[in-house]
């Protein structure tokens, strides 16, 4: 699966499998941005693992020339953690929907974030359950009408950016599938970041929640003078939901989970009497 350097073009990451997404689905823009970003970073497919959950977005690994794991609904993060721990040299990218990540998989997010696993996690956020025909999701706006909410959702949407900043993610950003060049740059920053990098990608579902008409008027760049290392300011920015703000909200550097595990293994090996052997002896 190794490719010569000359072949690191976006085209080289295509599997030849044509996405079966509806024409106009935002996920096409996310996939194109991912191709661009991987090519720009010259990520060798043999060193790349794309892990997904279940949903329209969950099909993504099938379209990227790399190792892939189309896992269970909501289980992107535990699978990705296992992959990264088994081989920390791999570039691990998690992809999934807003339902996958914030509903059924929501319990995994705080722990992946606070552990600071070195991976990028992209949510393709269409504020609906696309694959199962448009039911409301945790990011659907109040009043959202669907088969599961015929009188409009009575719930407040959750705020992915504020949530991830609060949980301790060391990189938090937001992109839009309709701005693939900017999105590719953001994904590149997320992959380059050493630690847990979360990117919320607004990716409209043209079939069940067509937001293409409302999103462009709400788009805003994060102010150039925003200090990404200021967590309180990043949180305040994330709470401003009038606009869909694009760019990096927060970034800091902390030791990663894998680095911590290596230290624990070294300590256990150096302990006298060796800890692991003493534990095994108890059960002998
Ligand atoms: C355990 C389990 N529960 C429910 C489902 C049904 N299901 C499949 S995808 C999905 C939601 C998809 O929404 P989202 O994660 O936002 O992805 P999208 O299709 O919008 O990309 C649901 C509820 C399932 N496959 N497995
Ligand atoms: S149902 Fe929505 S999310 Fe799924 S492929 Fe179609 S447009 Fe995309
Ligand atoms: Mg969705």
Image (cartoon, rainbow, N blue to C red):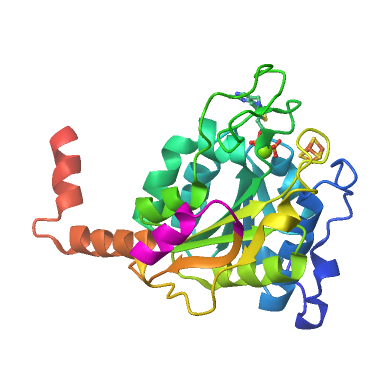
Residue 268 occupies which quadrant of the picture? bottom left
Residue drawn at (44%, 64%) of the image = 195
For the N terminus, which image quadrant? bottom right
Is residue 23 shown left or right of residue 216? Answer: right
Identify which residue, 70 or 114, lies in the foreground: 114
Question: Height in image: 62 above or below 177?
Answer: above
109 horizontally vs 60: left or right: left
Task: Inspect this view and state whether residue 89 appears.
Answer: no
Task: Indicate the position of residue 90 as horizontal and vertical percent values.
Answer: 55, 64
Q: Nearer the viewer, residue 243 or 13?
A: 243
Q: Residue at x 42, y 75 (%)?
A: 227
Q: Residue furthest bottom?
A: 6
Q: Where does ligand 2 appear, by image quarter? A: top right
Residue 43: image x %, image y %? Answer: 66, 72
Where is residue 181? Give x, y as percent. 75, 71
Q: Is residue 47 left or right of residue 81?
A: right
Q: Main secondary structure of the magenta part?
A: helix
Splitting the image into 4 quarters, where does residue 165 fall?
bottom left
The reply to whether residue 239 is in sight is yes
Q: Quadrant of the C terminus?
A: top left
Highlighted range, magenta:
232-244
């Amino acid at each position: 699966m190794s490719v010569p350097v000359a072949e690191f073009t976006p085209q080289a990451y295509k599997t030849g499998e044509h996405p079966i997404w509806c024409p106009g689905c935002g996920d096409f823009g996310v996939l194109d941005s991912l191709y661009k970003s991987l090519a720009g970073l010259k990520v060798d497919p043999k060193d790349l693992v794309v892990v997904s959950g279940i949903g329209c977005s969950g099909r993504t690994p099938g379209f990227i020339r790399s190792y892939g794991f189309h896992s269970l609904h909501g289980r992107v993060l535990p699978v990705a953690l296992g992959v990264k721990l088994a081989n920390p040299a791999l570039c691990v990218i998690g992809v999934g929907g807003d339902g996958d990540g914030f509903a059924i998989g929501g319990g995994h997010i705080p722990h992946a974030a606070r552990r600071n696993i070195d991976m990028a996690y992209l949510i393709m956020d269409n504020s609906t359950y696309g694959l199962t025909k448009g039911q409301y999701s945790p990011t659907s706006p109040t009043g959202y009408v669907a088969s599961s909410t015929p009188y409009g959702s009575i719930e407040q949407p959750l705020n992915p950016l504020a949530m991830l900043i609060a949980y301790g993610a060391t990189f938090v950003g937001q992109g839009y599938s309709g701005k693939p060049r900017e999105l590719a740059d953001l994904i590149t920053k997320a992959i380059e970041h050493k630690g847990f990098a979360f990117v919320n990608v607004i990716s409209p579902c043209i079939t069940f929640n067509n937001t293409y008409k409302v999103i462009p008027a709400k788009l805003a760049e994060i102010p150039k003078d925003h200090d990404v290392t200021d967590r309180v300011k990043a949180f305040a920015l994330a709470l401003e939901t009038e606009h869909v703000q694009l760019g990096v909200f927060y970034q800091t550097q902390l030791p990663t989970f894998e680095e911590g595990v290596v230290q624990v293994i070294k300590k256990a090996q150096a302990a006298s009497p060796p800890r692991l052997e003493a534990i095994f002896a108890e059960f002998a």
